[in-house]
Image (cartoon, rainbow, N blue to C red):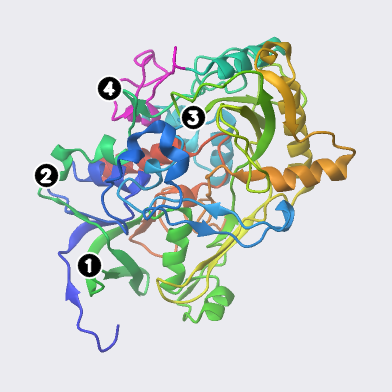
Amino acid sequence: MTGVKVEREPNADVVIVGGGSAGALLAARLSEEPARRVLLIEAGGEAKDPDIWNPAAWPALQGRSYDWDYHTEPQVGTAGRVHRWARGRLVGGSSCLHAMGYMRGHPSDFQAWVEATGDSRWSWDSLLPAFQALEDHPLGGNGLYGRGGPMPVYLPGDEVSPVARAYIEAGASLGLPRLEGHNSGQMIGVTPNSLNIRDGRRVTVADAWLTPAVRSRPNLTILGETRVRRLVVNANHVRGLEIVRRDGSPAQVLADQVVLCAGALETPALLMRSGIGPEHTLDAAGVACLIDVPEIGRNVQDHLLGAGNLYAARRPVPPSRLQHSESMAYMRAGSFTAGGQPEIVVGCGVAPIVSECFQAPAAGSAYSLLFGITHPTSRGSLRISGPELGDRLIIDPAYLQTGRDRDLFRRALEAAREIGHREELADWRERELLPGPLNGEAEIDSFIARSVITHHHPCGTCRMGKDTDAPVDANLRFKALDNLFIVDASVLPSLTAGPIHAAVLAVAESFARWMTAAD
């Protein structure tokens, strides 16, 4: 910004970059201390589109003005396709866009975090108080679920689609246990999805934590429609942030502590624009390398879902009264019995959900069974293409690049078809439309490559770990800088079995507790 007059925004004790799920929660929690000045910077504005709060409208939100709408590189493992990654660009972030599923994960998921970090605070048992603090669960107060927390966890009842009910019965007939939800620690089984819905409306993280009372706190400032161009670093300390305000004017912010909550894509991108990241990547993007951190932008992980195993309906399928994908059944590959960490998932979509490679039938005339794997071993990368905010991100998730992932996807498709052809679904099933006859492994893999879509769970690009290569430590401190923390999906060393949103919230709540205890 040489030669440009730069104004200063008010200084803060803590600057939070990114007003999505983790950032909105942290802004509320850290500003509970009146003496702590908190500044929340968000690239987007406030949520205003009424469709955001209509659960059934969520697929139509993608591509609107408040969606970052990232595009991946063409993927060899998915028939050369480019995948669109929807991420929220507004206060509340992707909690305003996603399908509202609330699934903590399986205890084994968090044991992997313990092993990665060497810290037992990331175990299921240690995180349980954080999960409970988040939740307003109808079964809360029993020592397992929370009650009275900011985020409702809704267990659907009579409004569950009759197709989803038949699907659940089909899974149970194969031996899958019936669950009261996905959040008890046992995930293998059948149940309607637990949802962040109250009174028929989506509840975003902004709705839950940034209430009018919180927003009125004199020590909390929310700076919307403002982007952080780069961090200003001196030795091992972040001295400030260069920002671009909504009118395009530059400014600087000073802070004692900086917490990056911009997500698995924008957090590493900001670090790279600031000269922090893999030296060869920065050189190629025209950015001088200040701190060589090779692992930033690596370890990209995401869940895929096959869309799908499609069935023509014998009679009209009623529109979903929830959010279309009403039940996810987790299981071991090749087994419908209880126990252990899930390996694959089959979901019931009460709408004809297919990838762009296939023509979707008319709404109400068909339904889909979605299928996927819970812990992919493929690892991708992310890098910047240039030094400026408008330079695109180069996202390569490296989908389906390991033999294990491809094998488990075949077994997930097999499980979907086995459930889909059960007698319990006979009243709804006229015939299978997709995939149809598949002769041999090559045809199966070809269908999977064309059918898979993102489940919208990118993570891992600034992983926490005890090894020297991990950018972030178990306290969520960025190792190379003494006053910088990262609290978002980028720090997850590995995926949870299902949607990661609940886990990201628990990470943020845990960090808030540590900071409060340190005061």
Discs 2, 1 touching: Cβ within 8 Å: no
Q: Quadrant of residue 420?
A: top right
Q: Nearer the viewer, residue 226 or 478?
A: 226
| 502 w.r.t. 248: above or below | above
Examine the rendering and report whether any part of residue 343 can be seen: no
**Looking at the image, is mark 3 or mark 1 earlier in the sequence?**
3
Dot 2 corresponds to which residue? 216
Q: Which residue is mark 1?
A: 254
Q: Earlier in the sequence, mark 2 or mark 1?
A: 2
Crowd band around label 1 with a 10 angstrom C-alpha radius: few (<14), some (14–19), many (20+): many
Q: Indicate which disc residue 103 carries.
A: 3
Give the residue pinned by disc 4: 148
Where is residue 167? Give x, y as percent.
62, 18
Looking at the rendering, the stretch of residues picked out in magenta corresponds to 130-159
From the image, which quarter does the C terminus lie in? top left
Gap in angstroms between the C-alphas marked 4 and 2: 22 Å
Q: Is residue 392 above or below residue 284?
A: above
Lower position in the chain sequence, tag 3 or tag 2: 3
The residue at the point 73 percent across, 58 percent down is: 76
Name the amino acid type tagged 4.
Answer: Gly
Q: Amino acid at mark 3?
A: Met
Q: Residues within 10 Å of mark 3 (few under 14, many from 20)?
A: many
